[in-house]
Image (spheres, helix red, strand yellow):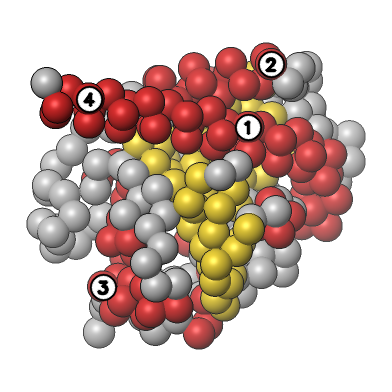
Amino acid sequence: MPLDPQKAADFIKEQAPGFMPRVGIVLGSGLGGLADKIDAVASLNFTDIPDFPRSSVEGHQGKLVLGRLGGMPVICMQGRIHLYEGVDPQDLAVPVRVMKLLGVEILLVTNAAGSFHEEVGPGRLMLISDHINFTSRNPLIGENDERFGPRFFSMEDAYDPILREHLKAVAKELSIDLSEGVYLHYPGPNFETPAEIRAFKTLGADAVGMSTTPEVLVARHCGMRVAAISNITNLVAGLSKTALSHEQTLECAKLAANDLEKLVIIFLETLKRELLKAHMKEEADGDN
Ligand code: HPA
């Protein structure tokens, strides 16, 4: 039986009555600390939510936290599920669809990634401008669920240009170096070979990681606006002077974790002001 996002959403609504999140956040490896900054209304283990997929990776706690961050009502995945865990790719559609059913309009995705550019090394952040799905898998393969979106849809401007401009402006205000580039999703669980890295460079990748494209595909299918940020934890295989490992990823994820937290919180604050302005304008226009 496929997992039913409605069942999971109904359960979550019961745990946080009357709470409607506007922004969904997915936290990558070593970035779970941001969830602790949420003024929480409810905090649920993935394993306690019916019809919700579960994570098995160390460093991905597997919690869903609902509450306010930067004043914005959010729902945050502290940890995510990856293709390499061997789950049915269709199950990866569930968390984002649950968010949609709860009212989320904007999805903010974070991940840990290796950088192809020596000048953008560990401790730096990269705004994702586009992606290459190199996994040959996709949570949307199979019968289309018309409740969420159409069979065929565009992935042009999938990473919302306006949200990207907002994030760049906030980063500038906070004096945070934010580069921008293309993220390539490698299936893992091994890190890439140097030959693969050379091939991916010619394909146009700026960073590589093992996540993100499933959530972004599902979010765009159901019409959410998307922004995504890579926390650069290493230079890619062949460029890196240290051996790549999950421990290394978690250790170096700490370098930019603070910058990322500040960036996200201030971004949400400005977004909230923008939404309020738009809402007030709509109301005023309605009165005229
Ligand atoms: N490759 C794949 N996934 C990663 C990397 C990498 O270099 N760094 C962090 N996650």
Which amino acid type corresponds to the residue marked 4 in the rendered image? Ala
Disc 2 from disc 1: Cα separation? 10 Å
Disc 1 versus disc 3: nearer the observer: 1
The residue labelled by disc 4 is: 284
The residue labelled by disc 1 is: 266
Q: Along the polypeptide, which appears first: circle 2 or circle 1?
A: 2
Mark 3 Cα shell of 10 Å, populated few (<14), some (14-19), many (≥20): some
Element at badge 2? helix
Does mark 2's beta carbon lie closer than 8 Å to ligand 1? Answer: no
Does mark 3's beta carbon lie closer than 8 Å to ligand 1? Answer: no
**Which residue shows up at 71% across the image and 59% down it?**
36
What is the number of the mark on residue 200? none
Which amino acid type corresponds to the residue marked 2 in the rendered image? Glu
Establish if 166 lies above or below 113: above
The residue furthest right is 242
Which amino acid type corresponds to the residue marked 1 in the rendered image? Ile
Disc 4 versus disc 1: nearer the observer: 4
Evaluate whether residue 248 shows in this view.
Answer: no
Disc 1 from disc 3: Cα separation? 32 Å
Horizontal arrangement in the rendering, residue 64 relative to residue 57 (left or right)? left
Element at badge 1? helix
- Residue 288, by quadrant, is top left
Which amino acid type corresponds to the residue marked 3 in the rendered image? Gln
Q: Along the polypeptide, which appears first: circle 3 or circle 2?
A: 3
Mark 1 Cα shell of 10 Å, populated few (<14), some (14-19), many (≥20): some
Image coords of residue 59 (percent x, y): 72, 64
Mark 2 Cα shell of 10 Å, populated few (<14), some (14-19), many (≥20): few
Establish if 143 lies above or below 224: below
The residue labelled by disc 2 is: 173
Establish if 259 lies above or below 56: above
Horizontal arrangement in the rendering, residue 230 relative to residue 237 (left or right)? left
